[in-house]
Image (cartoon, grey):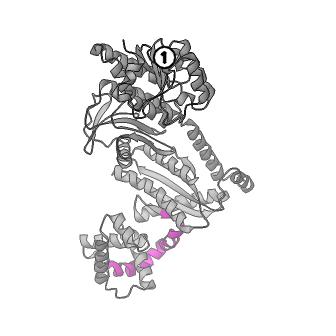
Amino acid sequence: MLTLREILDWEILSGHTVIAGAGSLGSEVLSVTVIDAPDAVNWVKAREFVVTSTYPVQQSPQALVALIEQLAARNAAGLGVKLTRFLREFPDDARCRADELGLPIVSLPGPLAWSDLIGRVFADGDRQSSQAAHLSAIYRGFSQHRARLGSLRELFDLVTGFVNLPVVLAVEDEMGLRIESRGVSSAEAEGLAETLIHGEATGTHPQDTPLRLTVGSETVAVARTGMSANGGGLVAIVERAQTASDADLECLRLSVHLLQTLLDANIGAQSHANGDARLLSQLLDPLLSGEAKQLLVARGLPDAARWHLVVGRIFDAGALDQALLSLRLRQFARRRLALLRMEDDDGGCTIAIPATDADARSEDAALREFSQIFERQARRASDFRYGLGQAGPAALRDAAELHREAREAMAFGVSLNGFNRLSRHDDLLLMRLLAHPAVIEESRASFLRLLDPLLAMGEQGRMLITTLRVWFQEDESMPRTAERLGLHVNTVRQRLDRSRAALRLTDLGTDTRLRLYVALQLLPMLRPGES
């Protein structure tokens, strides 16, 4: 029969320190058990060597003393502690109490995996008994967290206590992406998390539970919750030098259920989001008085005198992941202290974004960030069609008027510029004036004469017209034009030079620029069917 002194001589425990109870190291050890919850001591059996990360007793030294007394009463073989994350030093009163009771206390090496210790203790038995004991220790360890899991870090400590391979745990919810990892770089962990959570990995074998996926050059065993309106998460083992064992895979199966409890705990954040949606609905109510709206604004909203209001409408969802879009919008609203209301009728949204008086560039950055949420979803689902309209900034008590302007901007922008872009109400005022049927008829011949050299070039001309329109829409920025069209900046510059030569424009002064801009923007109305 093994004694605790013999176990401490093993190489995997090199670097240990005996803190207390040195005179009792000859006690026999029948098994090893892990405790990481306050009430787990109730499951300890006689002559078990108990190991812990000290998470259950980190808040109270008296809790550690009580644990020592309970273990001694149950005739435990000893207590092994890791003083690396929660408790960093062993309290003197607890050490003295352990000496009084004759209970050995051992400081264990930080890198030690519980599975290595458990496996070694049972190595002398037959393989089936050893595996059963190992799984029993895993079940007991995980069952201590069934009722409550405090954080992703707590789950990470639990998993890495049993699994000795590279591990990645990740949760993405309204608060953003949170990652815990061991054995992989931060960049690799983030890449794996993004890919696995959103299901873009290859090599899926549906009969495997957990799944085995290929992500780049890595083979990964992963259990994941899938993406929902509350978010999604995963627990993954990276199989490099060796394959995950049956016990490792069982840890994944048990972990994903605990991971779901973290996501379900996001109900509070969802309730906050629902409160914001109700507040925005009240501000948009045309029957509510201005004084009542001012009172609502004064209650707990960010200290912003002006707000942008953006309306989003989905015309064709296609293969859009609606849950992921909703999650991204809620994340944006939390970051920007915005008021978000998801629309049930068309799957779109209405959002009020506080403006920053000190920095206009920050306002533009917020609107670009919001627009990019939809752009990224459109890249994932090529048949996704949407429109965005913006109005403001103005006082939030004028939200109903801003909402009307934003809807008009979205509708007119889609008819003028097509789907999948943000149209600003103020930017479209001139176009709306010029789009009056009488003005269109009066100016049609003049504008078409200006664009005729490009229209006569067929496909090449349409390509140059598209480049010019985007260039104007991006405030004549060649880098942004290139990014939007997926081109190199030099290609954009060459197209602009070709357009100027074809139009015979030696001077691009303000008047010429204005005529060209208006002609290009009104082209769909000047020649119906022209895009």
Q: Identify the residue shown where x is 48% and y is 17%.
A: 24
Residue 493 drawn in magenta: no
Q: Where is residue 328 in the image (x, y as percent from the top left)?
A: 47, 48
Element under disc 1? helix
Q: In this view, does 360 lie above or below 271?
A: below
Question: Can residue 458 be seen from the camera position used here?
Answer: no
Q: Is residue 120 above or below residue 376?
A: above
Question: Can residue 51 be seen from the camera position used here?
Answer: yes
Depth order, front residue of 523/475? 475
- Tally of marks: 1
Q: Identify the residue shown where x is 63% and y is 52%.
A: 284
In the picture, measured across the screen, residue 53 lies left or right of residue 508, that is: right
Image quadrant where one finds the C terminus: bottom left
Q: In this view, does 335 lie above or below 268?
A: below
Residue 435 drawn in magenta: yes
Q: Identify the residue shown where x is 69% and y is 51%.
A: 287
Image quadrant where one finds the N terminus: top left
Q: Which amino acid does label 1 sit on?
A: Ser
Depth order, front residue of 111/428? 111
- Label 1 crowd (10 A; few <14 / some 14-19 / many >=20): some
Question: Magenta stretch: dominant SS?
Answer: helix
- Residue placed under numbered mark 1 in the picture: 24
Q: Magenta span covers which residues?
A: 423-452
Q: Position of residue 281 (x, y in %)?
A: 62, 48
Q: Quadrant of residue 101?
A: top right
Q: Quadrant of residue 25?
A: top left
Depth order, front residue of 433/239? 239
Q: Is residue 331 above or below residue 450?
A: above
